[in-house]
Image (cartoon, helix red, strand yellow):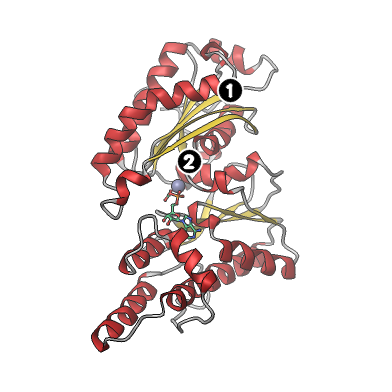
Amino acid sequence: MTTEMITTRAEQGTEELILAIETSCDETSAAIVRGGREVLSNIVSSQIATHQQFGGVVPEIASRQHVESITRITEQAVRKAGISLRDISAVAVTQGPGLVGALLVGIVAAKSLAMALSVPLIGTHHIAGHIYANALVHELEYPLLALVASGGHTELVLLEREGEFRIIGRTRDDAVGEAYDKVARSLKLSYPGGPHIDRLAQQADRATPLPRSWLESDSYDFSFSGLKSAVLAVINQHGMKGLTLDEPALARGFQESVIEVLTEKAIRAARSAGVRQLLLCGGVAANSGLRQALAERCDAEGIPLLVPPLSLCSDNAAMIAAAAHLKWQRGQFTELDMKGDPGLSLEDWSVSRHRES
Ligand code: KG4
Ligand code: ZN
């Protein structure tokens, strides 16, 4: 494909149509998004039912299911959007982080489409996608702080400008969603455990006291493995003494500890950086307690809080198109020999760091 061809399409004046593909974990998704904002379609095929029997995502099975679904899901996305493949301006795909075999399926599909249609390819960062899911429904104002809470990530990301990512805090062990899933598993609840713990916590009339992991007083980092061990200790003690476990109380104790630490660190970071907005994103952003606690604290602090609708919290391809739009606007495209990168750095994906490869 020639640069000339890319320029011609970008300069047409009409807003671009991005076909995006997301296969980083256990959702196969394809979407068509116009101008980084208007979602014409966003098809998500979840593999949860398959992985449930194993209590978590089995990478090899995830890859195989992506292979089985990717063509059908992509065709559906194009059909639902009411467009023709010829209308597509660029193909975006999650380059990383994620399961390497799973990423590869989406990447091969995206490269084939980009080549066949002679349009640019945009390798996209999964977490940039979670953050920019908010741009599909809100007007973003910078500087802003994003609290990313998902199954694989827990990060505080400062964006001084559009497309510039700086991680100021991250988990030192388990991601928050991972902790939810592990605690749920030890309570014999099915995968993914987050929604079950959330539901149980709401039913509880009391909370089991559990520790808060604040780390050093000036740190924005997180740690959830100590909390997870504390929950396991409560379960084991009850088992050994033959006592009945108050599961809702334990779920509420766990959830309160998680929410308090996430909320307080996010608010402290937002205040200290003087941001104009706080964004919540990632699968755990679906948590009702977290949404409510952050909303109350942001209200008290006068910090506008943006949260995507539930359908855009969990993994989906529309969020990948929203992030890819940043690169489209700047003509920052990816070579067709791009590799999937399970450890792709968010900061390196910033628009100011784009390198012609
Ligand atoms: O962002 P996501 O869909 O996938 C990753 O990129 O990791 O996040 C999935 C995670 C799972 O760990 C799941 O248990 C958690 O999000 N989750 C929740 C809730 N809904 C999903 N955690 C707590 N409360 C919820 N309501
Ligand atoms: Zn995700």
Which secondary structure, mark 2?
Answer: helix
Which secondary structure, mark 1?
Answer: helix
| 237, above or below 47, in the image | below
Structural crowding at the residue carrying mark 1, measured as other residues with C-alpha within 10 Å and reported as few (<14), some (14–19) or many (≥20):
some
Q: Are marks 1 and 2 in contact (CB under 8 Å)?
A: no
State the residue at coordinates (32%, 78%).
235
Residue located farthest toward the right when viewing the structure as drawn: 302
Residue 295 at x, y percent in the picture: 67, 64
Badge 1 or badge 2: first in the primary sequence: 1
Structural crowding at the residue carrying mark 2, measured as other residues with C-alpha within 10 Å and reported as few (<14), some (14–19) or many (≥20):
some
Tag count: 2
The label shown at residue 198 is: none
Screen quadrant of the N terminus = top left
Residue 7 at x, y percent in the picture: 59, 15
The label shown at residue 81 is: 1
The label shown at residue 349 is: 2
Q: Amino acid at mark 2?
A: Trp
State the residue at coordinates (27%, 86%).
242
Residue 265 versus residue 329: which sits nearer the camera?
265
| 149, above or below 218, in the image | above
Residue 356 at x, y percent in the picture: 45, 28
| 225, above or below 156, in the image | below
Q: Amino acid at mark 1?
A: Ala
Quadrant in which residue 40 is drawn: top right
Residue 61 at x, y percent in the picture: 26, 40
Residue 291 visible somewhere in the drawing: yes
Residue 338 visible somewhere in the drawing: no
| 327, above or below 156, in the image | above
